[in-house]
Amino acid sequence: MVGHSRGLPIPRVAKPGRQPYTRSVEKRVDYVLVGGGLQNGLIALALLDRSPQVKVVLVEREPTLGGNHTWCFHSCDVPARARSWMDPLVVASWPEYEVRFPELRRLVHQPYEAITSERFAEVVSRQLASAPGCAVVTGVAAANVAAGRVVLEDGRAFAGWVVDARGPDPVATLDGAGFQKFVGLEVELTSPARITRPVVMEARVPQLDGYRFLYILPFAPDRMLVEDTYFSDDPRLDSSLVRRRIHDYLASCGLEPSRVVREEAGVLPMPWRGPIPAPVSEPFVAGVRGGWFHPGTGYSLPVAARVADLFARHAPEPPPARELAALRHRVHRQARFARFLNWMLFRAVEPDQRWRILQRFYRLPEETIARFYALETTACDRARVVVGRPPRGLRIPLP
């Protein structure tokens, strides 16, 4: 994989059975981060970058941090001051990306970058293991998460400012949402491919189960990630069927995998209504669980980076509640527009015509596209998105 750091030292990580803490004593730190996914990993890196003496414990119930993901973002999504702690996570970057629709093929001249969960786990674990007073605890879940205190299932307890980012509730329980579901295969090819830049949407494929497109990241001439993605009304995902479709697509492009390096799959909510996130308080509920994500794309990194940047600016002290509340207000004000677009996509357009909505979107100015992904749209951007000739396939009048 391009840019992948081989040979990094193996971090010392606290694991069940080899605990450096006394079970009967509560360990006092500055921050207790519950959940070892993207949001808390970024918070940890940002805190240590700004205040190296800060004491952080990161708790993850799984054996490793980061799960099994590929996180992508546009370079302009991330504050410039965050690059010092974000750059070590990036495994590949490209100066532009491409979209392909039945009636449109376009290059978008916006730098695009990728982070893998493997690199994420390496960097976050190494940084915390090497920082005095910090630790990563994996393989054990939190039994009780409360303001100022976290108790683990093995009896250990940590006191500090608590951030709860343990992931979303099951999407199948959501009402008023469509679903972005996907299976991705990272493959090594028997011969180099001609694809040299990301294809964010390859929609010139049969439109099945709603809006279907392929998402392609070329990490090297003979190595790429191919995700078969659906904007569907149904959260059920037949991974074996979608896996076969990916192989069929590769064969149609004259590409033959020599092996599958890794597989990932997911079902993300695309809500158009739902409960309003709880007020900012402690424990601070972060990540997707707290509604800190882009409801129209599933992209979570731009918002996660902004939250982490806010933490860094006040380290080693917790961020003021008023600033967290102000950031939440800005994010969810933007999210309301994305939710309206989800309603239009899933309720106002015939499923096999949804691609026309996305094709129309990608005719907009590049700056408008970039601000939409970053959840920073202006009033002018929102007007450009919704004003104009309605796309074919509209089945009910807009409200």
Image (tube, rainbow, N blue to C red):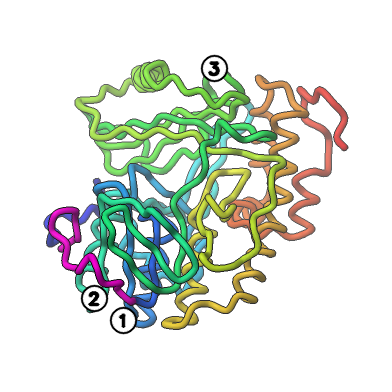
Residues 199 and 80: in front is 80
- Residue type marked 1: Pro
Residue 269: mark in rendering? none
Q: Is 391 a magenta residue?
A: no
Sequence-earlier tag: 2 or 1: 1
- Residue type marked 2: Ala
Q: Which residues are magenta?
A: 11-28
> Marks 2/1: CA distance?
7 Å
Contact between labelled residues 1 and 2, with CB atoms less than 8 Å apart: yes
Q: Is residue 253 visible?
A: no
Q: Position of residue 151 (x, y in %)?
A: 36, 61
> Marks 3/1: CA distance?
52 Å
Contact between labelled residues 3 and 2, with CB atoms less than 8 Å apart: no
Q: Residue furthest front?
A: 24
Q: Is residue 348 above or below residue 277?
A: above
- Rendered image quadrant of residue 277: bottom right
Q: Give the main secondary structure of the magenta stretch.
A: loop
Q: Residue at x 26, y 22 (%)?
A: 256
- Rendered image quadrant of residue 322: bottom right
Sequence-earlier tag: 3 or 1: 1
Q: Position of residue 271 (x, y in %)?
A: 65, 40
Residue 52: mark in rendering? 1
> Marks 2/3: CA distance?
51 Å
Q: Position of residue 6 (x, y in %)?
A: 15, 54
Q: Residues within 10 Å of mark 2 (few under 14, many from 20)?
A: some
Q: Residue at x 45, y 52 (%)?
A: 112
- SS at mark 3? loop
Q: Position of residue 165 (x, y in %)?
A: 46, 56
Q: Which residue is mark 3?
A: 206
Q: Residue at x 34, y 19 (%)?
A: 247
Q: Which residue is mark 2?
A: 131
